[in-house]
């Protein structure tokens, strides 16, 4: 499960991951209730492996069997961090959480550490592995932005009765197969110099 700070980020990262061959689906406040329930049910049924969610959309939902929580955007409220990573600890299960931290997030990150009363260790990454994926991720990112632009233009047009596919599955022909096939190991790197830290 990946948490994003905005609806736009949740939708964009879902498209990015889909362009990399990962079965991701968004869940955010700009989706209709029916679409949100559809996304949730697909994730619960394991027909989608990654759920991209905002805090507002996911609050109060029963989402069992979450193995890993990734904070793509660090939460602005420290208590939201506890709610997010707690998704991996349902029914006595254990899991992993990873938080992406930029130089602009350090203060928020330190507040989280103060709240939970412990220092969070850096998550080990191999720079060579990350650099091997940069080109493929950049290409997927470019396609995702094009799809977001198309979706925005479609929303401005008069509706012809059919609702747009909020789950990022009905994009209109921009998506192409990203070179190299599926994304190795299900890992991905985020640009802008992000380092990652493990949460639990």
Image: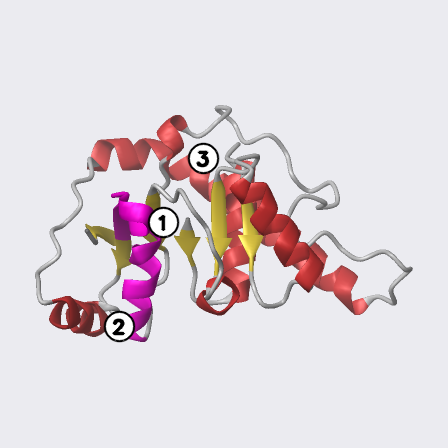
Estimate the x, y position of residue 177 in percent, counting from the top left: 60, 30
Say if mark 3 contacts mark 1, CB within 8 Å: no
Residue under numbered circle 1 = 190
User: Is 155 part of what is drawn in magenta?
Assistant: no
Q: Earlier in the sequence, mark 2 or mark 1?
A: 2
Q: Residue 78 carries which label?
A: 2
Q: Is residue 82 left or right of residue 117?
A: right
Answer yes or no: is residue 33 visible. Answer: yes
Q: Nearer the viewer, residue 66 or 71?
A: 66
Residue under numbered circle 3 = 136
Q: Earlier in the sequence, mark 3 or mark 1?
A: 3
Estimate the x, y position of residue 30 in percent, counting from the top left: 63, 67
Crowd around label 3: few <14 · some 14–19 · many ≥20 (10 Å): some
Residue, x 85% and y 56% (percent of image)?
162
Q: What element carries label 3?
A: helix
Which quadrant of the structure image shows residue 36? Answer: bottom right
């Amino acid at each position: 499960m990946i948490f994003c700070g905005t609806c736009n980020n949740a939708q964009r990262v879902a498209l990015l991951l889909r362009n990399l061959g990962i079965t991701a689906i968004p869940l955010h406040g700009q989706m209709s209730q029916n679409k949100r329930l559809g996304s949730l049910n697909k994730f619960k049924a394991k027909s989608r492996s990654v759920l991209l969610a905002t805090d507002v959309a996911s609050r109060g939902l029963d989402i069992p069997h979450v193995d890993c929580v990734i904070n793509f955007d660090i939460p602005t409220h420290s208590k939201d961090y506890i709610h997010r990573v707690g998704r991996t600890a349902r029914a006595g299960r254990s899991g992993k959480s990873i938080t992406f931290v930029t130089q602009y997030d350090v203060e928020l990150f330190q507040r989280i550490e103060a709240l939970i009363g412990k220092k969070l260790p850096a998550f080990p990454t191999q720079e060579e592995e990350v650099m091997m994926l940069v080109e493929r991720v950049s290409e997927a990112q470019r396609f995702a932005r094009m799809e977001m632009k198309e979706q925005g233009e479609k929303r401005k047009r008069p509706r012809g009765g059919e609702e747009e596919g909020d789950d990022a599955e009905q994009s209109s022909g921009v998506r192409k197969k990203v070179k190299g096939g599926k994304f190795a190991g299900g890992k991905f790197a985020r640009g802008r110099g992000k380092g990652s830290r493990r949460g639990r």
